[in-house]
Image (spheres, rainbow, N blue to C red):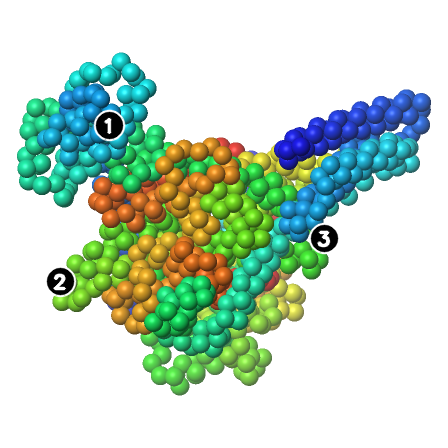
């Protein structure tokens, strides 16, 4: 372990003074307004510590990819950002997750309000057992984002267009969401998430259940959507991270090992572990 | 572009209130259901517990020639209407059995009339004022008190509430259930084994499966019609007997046992079957030596639950005449008999208040047996439960 | 000879033959094997095969003979029957011993016989259903030969009082002819079922929602068995509770409100039946609600929905087929429920919609018709089978629909898991 740390130290030749949580190298093309600031985040499942001292600054209107071997805590971390971990009874969280100047784990923070601003797309597409139209219109209507039918129609159409699904489904809006193909279902779920106009969209391995063509479609979509939304995606697939992400964070055994500009991460990783992972030595 | 946390939180207030309302409503429903149960059991206890006590009074009994002829003469005029007529009727018989009693006069604790019993328990009674005063005097003298009612557990039905007991019904229940289990346990287990382990996946198997599910949902009274039309009228099985009752209940319990056994068989992992086939066992040997022993606890649990269900069933038995008046305990499968729930039904129809108490007392006994059976099933399931 | 003596003799000889078959076959197989011949099966298997072929046909023949004698009145002298079945047993023994050959698959033969026995057991359930159906249909047809079917379905007066006089050939002595218009019975059944459902569906469904969505594990593990106790209470006990405790309370409350209620009002059995049915609805609904995949809930919560909104808009619609199916089963249960209504509802066929009046149900009339003193052939007794037929058809249909719905529900969530 000590040897490892020593190696990391040997690698890090800091060209500028870095506060914890900032990427090693900055991506010149990326936007750098702060979206979510995470400091000293620890998480336990019962007595198992799943996240250890995570520090990360996530910037707005970028795609940030979280990579790492399975069981490294990247999905758990993602779920901390909109408090989906609250649904698991044995989970205990410590540390700061700050958004818009507010600690999201604060007792006064309403997790329902948080989730409105931090949407989520899941690994397996999970459309509701309703029509395609209702899948999208349901949440905005509940949130009073629309008041008239015409407005609602417009919103549904916009969300489906943004998700690149409109042309495929415009003639069958009343059919059940489950009648679509897997890739279409996943885009429906993305449309559903963007229809409530969140700031951040969390994507938990959104393409792992899909075929390569659908995967490519969704990757293109992420690229388009980052103009409007902050996207944080967990992925198993390093090529995907390299293709879509502006920044990439590498997780291992509950720790965040490296947070870096994606290009730098894949060409010249800062830490030994990240290098080993990226070159396929484990994972 | 998007709203701040404070704006959203403010909008959410109303929705959170609604959400809390659903939680409280649903919790209320559960509490309501539990309250029903508590009220129900409390009501039965209040009504039924007194049945386990019976009033007895101490009177002077003179065994004379006259009381041999006219039994009521054995007790004083004052006590005559307070003593159970059922008790008086037994005096000549006792004198015949014990000749040494003749000519003696003894102070004895004897069974009181049911009206006295109700009076002592503080219930409404038809007792006249003078009789009430007489009972009060006896009570003050320590000559009238409530004692544990052993008769309730040892004697059969009677038209006099103070004499009525559940023994004949209890024996009838046991006999009936013996027939039921003797028929439906082997058939049920064999059917389940066939469907789970042997049956080819064809049309007939599907029909049998659908049919079993339907049979489980057929109203129980229709089994009574079946019993009446087929067993009694067609096969000539004697009416009102444990035999016909047991056969009828067997058909009713069959689906319960089949479904429970199938679940138990299914819970045995296929790896065990494959391992047994792998060492050259035939299908039947696999079932006999491996699958059945492993699923036996599940089968037993299901059978106990089926047994409890059959024990509480009344409607089909009424149809086949098992509501007979059975004063004596009979241990034959082909004599007229009654069962506990049918006895409860009969007593519930009697107008006397004392019978209401007996009914509730019988219900308490029945519930105690059923709850212990179910507890036994739960215990077995816990003890033998296996995770594969 | 007495029947039981013959029976004992038969059993004794058969037992002896069976034992002989077992040991002789085993000895022969062991000898064959000892002589170095390879055999297809174990000696014990040959032995068991011999026992089966000795006893099986003999028992079958004697059973068929006894059946024919008892039921069809065939005149077969019992001794002949005894002798012939024992002779068959002896032939079986010889055949069995002859089959102890190295090239005979005794094990497979046993397997086939056992499989046949198991399949025969499985047929019992089919025979039972057929038995119910045939016995009911047969008697119901006899009823409809006496009474008009149309009158039965549409008539509004149920007055079987005079029918037994007519059956006794004294029909003209009765003041009026018997009438079998079953509409009041169906209406009564329907109203009591409706009351029961109005209690059971909300309480059961909300309890299920609480247990599946809100309750901590500790309460859930406690509440489930408590509700099951409600289902385990015998119906006769509920009937007593309805008649002795609930009905007077209903009358008292109606009195306070200035209403007039009968002591055998329809409300009391309806309410108590509702209580009885709560656990059916709650446990089935709980099952289907927990079967709704968690990804649905998470999908909704991640959109910023509250828990209640998620339940109402996503979980309940998804589990609706299961809930409807549970409710249909409950309705079928309520329609066929007998003891509660026999003990607490009225006997008087009364065409009314007022639940405070007494009314009667199909099951009450079935019981009344079959526990009276009438001859079996009387129209009143047979009317019970006509009513039973209606009950059977309706509950069967409800059950079928329910099974189909729950199957759809299951398939849907299996296929949706991609």
Q: Quadrant of the N terminus of chain C?
A: top right
Q: Which of marks 2 and 3 is in front?
A: 2
Kind of element beneath mark 1: helix
Q: Which chain carries label 3?
A: B
CA distance for labels 2 and 1: 56 Å
Tell me residue A92's x, y (percent). 38, 45
* Residues at circles 3 and 1 in contact by the CB criterion of under 8 Å: no
Q: Residue at x 66, y 50 (%)?
A: C73
Asked if one can make out residue C365 in the rendered structure from this viewpoint, the answer is: yes
User: Eyeballing the image, is B85 above or below C368?
Assistant: above
Relative placement, left or right, of A258 versus C230 is right
User: Eyeballing the image, is B56 above or below B349?
Assistant: above
Label 3, residues with CA under 10 Å away: few <14, some 14-19, many ≥20: few
The answer to which of marks 3 and 1 sits earlier in the sequence is 1
Q: Mark 1 lies on which chain?
A: B
Q: Which of C92 and C175 is in front in this view?
A: C175
Tell me residue C373's x, y (percent). 40, 55
Q: Which of B162 and B187 is in front in this view?
A: B162
Tell me residue C131's x, y (percent). 58, 56
Q: Which of marks 2 and 1 is in front?
A: 1
Q: Which chain carries label 2?
A: C
Labelled disc at residue B200: 3
- Direction top: furthest residue: B100
Label 1, residues with CA under 10 Å away: few <14, some 14-19, many ≥20: few
Relative placement, left or right, of B198 versus C372 is right
Kind of element beneath mark 2: helix
Labelled disc at residue C256: 2
């Amino acid at each position: 372990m000590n040897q490892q740390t020593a190696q990391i130290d040997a690698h890090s030749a800091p060209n500028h003074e870095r506060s914890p949580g900032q990427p090693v190298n900055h991506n010149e093309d990326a936007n750098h307004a702060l979206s979510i600031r995470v400091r000293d985040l620890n998480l336990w499942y019962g007595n198992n510590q799943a996240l250890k001292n995570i520090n990360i600054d996530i910037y707005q209107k970028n795609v940030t990819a979280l990579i790492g071997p399975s069981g490294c805590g990247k999905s758990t971390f993602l779920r901390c950002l909109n408090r989906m971990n609250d649904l698991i009874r044995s989970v205990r969280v410590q540390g700061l997750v700050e958004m818009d100047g507010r600690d999201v784990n604060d007792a006064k923070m309403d997790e329902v309000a948080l989730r409105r601003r931090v949407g989520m797309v899941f690994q397996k597409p999970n459309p509701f057992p309703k029509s395609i139209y209702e899948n999208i219109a349901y949440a905005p209507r509940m949130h009073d984002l629309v008041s008239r039918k015409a407005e609602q129609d417009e919103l549904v159409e916009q969300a489906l267009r943004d998700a690149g699904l409109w042309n495929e489904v415009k003639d069958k809006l009343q059919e059940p969401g489950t009648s679509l193909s897997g890739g279409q279902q996943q885009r429906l779920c993305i449309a559903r998430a963007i229809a409530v106009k969140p700031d951040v969209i969390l994507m938990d391995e959104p393409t792992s259940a899909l075929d390569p063509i659908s995967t490519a479609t969704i990757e293109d979509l992420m690229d388009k959507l980052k103009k409007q939304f902050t996207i944080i995606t967990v992925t198993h697939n390093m090529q995907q991270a390299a293709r879509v992400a502006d920044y990439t964070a590498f997780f291992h055994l509950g720790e965040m090992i490296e947070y870096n500009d994606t290009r730098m991460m894949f060409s010249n990783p800062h830490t030994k572990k990240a290098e080993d992972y990226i070159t396929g030595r484990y994972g | 572009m998007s709203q701040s946390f404070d704006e959203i939180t403010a909008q959410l207030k109303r929705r959170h209130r609604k959400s809390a309302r659903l939680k409280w409503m649903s919790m209320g429903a559960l509490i309501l259901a539990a309250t029903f149960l508590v009220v129900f059991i409390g009501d039965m206890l209040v009504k039924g517990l007194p049945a386990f006590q019976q009033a007895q009074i101490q009177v002077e009994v003179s065994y004379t020639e006259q009381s041999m002829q006219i039994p009521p003469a054995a007790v004083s005029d004052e006590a005559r209407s307070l003593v159970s007529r059922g008790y008086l009727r037994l005096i000549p018989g006792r004198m015949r059995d014990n000749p040494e009693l003749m000519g003696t006069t003894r102070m004895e604790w004897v069974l009181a009339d049911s009206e006295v019993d109700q009076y002592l328990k503080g219930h409404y009674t038809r007792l006249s004022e003078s009789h009430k005063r007489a009972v009060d005097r006896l009570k003050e003298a320590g000559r009238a008190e409530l004692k544990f009612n052993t008769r309730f557990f040892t004697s059969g039905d009677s038209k006099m509430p103070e004499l009525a007991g559940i023994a004949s019904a209890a024996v009838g229940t046991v006999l009936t259930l013996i027939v039921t289990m003797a028929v439906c346990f082997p058939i049920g287990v064999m059917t389940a084994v066939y469907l789970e382990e042997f049956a080819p996946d064809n049309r007939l198997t599907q029909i049998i499966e659908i049919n079993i599910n339907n049979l489980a949902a057929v109203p129980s009274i229709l089994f009574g019609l079946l019993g009446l039309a087929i067993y009694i009228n067609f096969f000539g099985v004697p009416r009102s007997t444990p035999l016909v009752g047991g056969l009828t209940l067997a058909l009713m319990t069959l689906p319960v046992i089949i479904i429970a056994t199938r679940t138990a068989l299914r819970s045995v992992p296929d790896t065990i079957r494959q391992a047994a086939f792998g060492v050259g066992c035939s299908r039947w040997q696999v079932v006999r030596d491996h699958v059945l022993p492993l699923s036996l606890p599940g089968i037993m649990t299901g059978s106990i639950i089926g047994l409890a269900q059959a024990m509480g069933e009344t409607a089909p038995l009424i149809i086949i005449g098992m509501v007979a008046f059975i004063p004596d305990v009979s241990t034959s499968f082909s004599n007229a008999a009654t069962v506990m729930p049918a006895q409860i039904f009969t007593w519930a129809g009697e107008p006397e208040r004392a019978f209401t108490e007996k009914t509730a007392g019988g219900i308490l006994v029945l519930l105690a047996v059923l709850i212990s059976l179910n507890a036994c099933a739960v215990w077995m399931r816990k003890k033998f439960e296996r995770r594969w | 000879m007495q029947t039981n003596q013959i029976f004992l003799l038969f059993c004794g000889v058969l037992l002896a033959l069976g034992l002989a078959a077992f040991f002789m076959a085993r000895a022969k197989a062991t000898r064959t094997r000892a002589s170095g011949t390879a055999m297809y099966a174990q000696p014990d298997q040959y032995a068991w095969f011999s026992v089966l072929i000795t006893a099986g046909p003999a028992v079958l023949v004697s059973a068929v003979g006894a059946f024919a004698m008892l039921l069809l009145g065939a005149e077969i002298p019992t001794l002949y029957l005894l002798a012939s079945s024992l002779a068959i047993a002896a032939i079986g023994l010889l055949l069995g011993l002859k089959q102890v050959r190295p090239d005979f698959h005794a094990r497979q033969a046993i397997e086939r016989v056992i499989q046949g026995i198991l399949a025969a057991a499985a047929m019992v359930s089919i025979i039972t259903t057929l038995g119910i159906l045939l016995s009911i249909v047969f008697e119901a047809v006899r009823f409809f030969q006496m009474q008009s079917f149309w009158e039965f379905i549409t008539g509004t007066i149920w007055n079987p009082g005079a029918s037994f006089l007519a059956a006794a050939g004294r029909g003209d002595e009765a003041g009026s002819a018997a009438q079998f218009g079953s509409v009041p019975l169906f209406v009564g059944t329907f109203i009591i079922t409706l009351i029961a459902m109005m209690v059971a569906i909300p309480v059961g469904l909300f309890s299920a929602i609480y247990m599946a969505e809100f309750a901590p594990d500790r309460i859930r593990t406690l509440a489930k068995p408590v509700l099951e106790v409600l289902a385990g209470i015998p119906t006769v006990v509920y009937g007593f509770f309805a008649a002795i405790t609930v009905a007077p309370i209903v009358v008292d409350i109606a009195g306070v409100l200035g209403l007039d209620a009968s002591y055998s009002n329809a409300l009391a059995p309806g309410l108590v039946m509702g209580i009885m049915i709560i656990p059916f609805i709650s446990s089935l609904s709980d099952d289907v609600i927990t079967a709704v995949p968690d990804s649905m809930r998470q999908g909704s919560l991640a959109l910023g929905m509250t828990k209640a909104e998620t339940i109402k808009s996503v979980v309940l619609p998804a589990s609706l087929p299961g809930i409807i199916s549970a409710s249909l089963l409950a309705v079928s249960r309520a329609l066929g429920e007998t003891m509660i209504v026999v003990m607490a509802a009225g006997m008087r066929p009364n065409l009314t919609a007022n639940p405070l009046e007494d009314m009667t149900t199909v099951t009450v009339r079935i019981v009344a018709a079959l526990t009276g003193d009438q001859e079996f052939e009387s129209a009143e007794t047979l009317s019970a089978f006509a009513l039973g037929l209606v009950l059977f058809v309706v509950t069967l249909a409800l059950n079928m629909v329910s099974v189909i719905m729950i199957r759809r529900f299951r398939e849907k969530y299996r296929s949706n898991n991609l």
